[in-house]
Image (cartoon, rainbow, N blue to C red):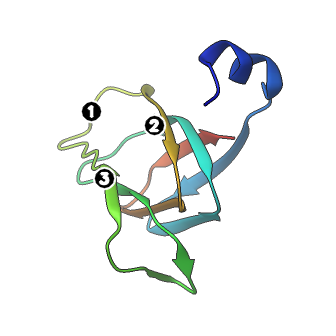
Amino acid sequence: MKSQVSEQFENVRYNYRLLSGQAVLEISGAVKLKSVLISRATSGEKFTIFDSAISGRFLSAGVSVIGMPYCGSEMESPKQLDFDVGLNSGLVIVSSGANWVITTTYK
């Protein structure tokens, strides 16, 4: 089992992906989800974060839901949601809403 200190020194480089509007983000394999930054929020924006293996554009059976952020009526932005959680199967974010942007940081 790795300690938190050794993990910080081994891999400090994070990747990121942008999502806008209604979209699906899919990253396979073990991933550490660092954070989600909501850059522009609009009313009705919502997205669900899954720890899931990816099969085409569909989620596998028995997935774990990591988060279900909802902006309601135009929350204050930018807003950063820190997760710092390891995902075993992969990272899938399914989003809906109109005109908004989120940035997902992971490694």
Percent coordinates x, y for residue 97 in the rendering: 34, 61
Dot placed on the residue nearer the N-terminal end, 3 or 1: 3
The residue wearing badge 2 is 38
Give the residue at x 59% y 41%: 32
Q: Secondary structure at mark 2?
A: strand
Name the residue at 62% across, 54% down: 30
Residue most extreme to the left: 72
The numbered mark at residue 93 is: none
Q: Is residue 68 above or below residue 60?
A: above
- In this rendering, the answer to whether 56 lies above or below 105 is below
Q: Is residue 45 left or right of residue 77?
A: left
Q: What kind of element bears circle 1? A: loop
Q: Are marks 3 and 1 in contact (CB under 8 Å)?
A: no
Q: Is 27 on the left or on the right of 96, as rendered?
A: right
Question: Decide: marks 3, 2 in contact (CB < 8 A)?
Answer: yes
* Residue 19 spot, x, y in % from top left: 56, 55
The numbered mark, 2 or 1, whose residue comes first in the sequence reads: 2
The total of numbered circles placed on residues is: 3
Which residue corresponds to mark 1? Answer: 75
| For marks 3 and 2 on the same chain, the one whose residue lies earlier in the sequence | 2
Is residue 81 at all visible to an observer of this figure? yes
Q: Give the residue type that dot 3 points to.
A: Glu
- At x 80%, y 30%, the residue is 13
User: Residue 45 — which label?
Assistant: 3
Sort mark 3 into few (<14), some (14-19) or many (20+) by Cα contacts within 10 Å. Answer: many
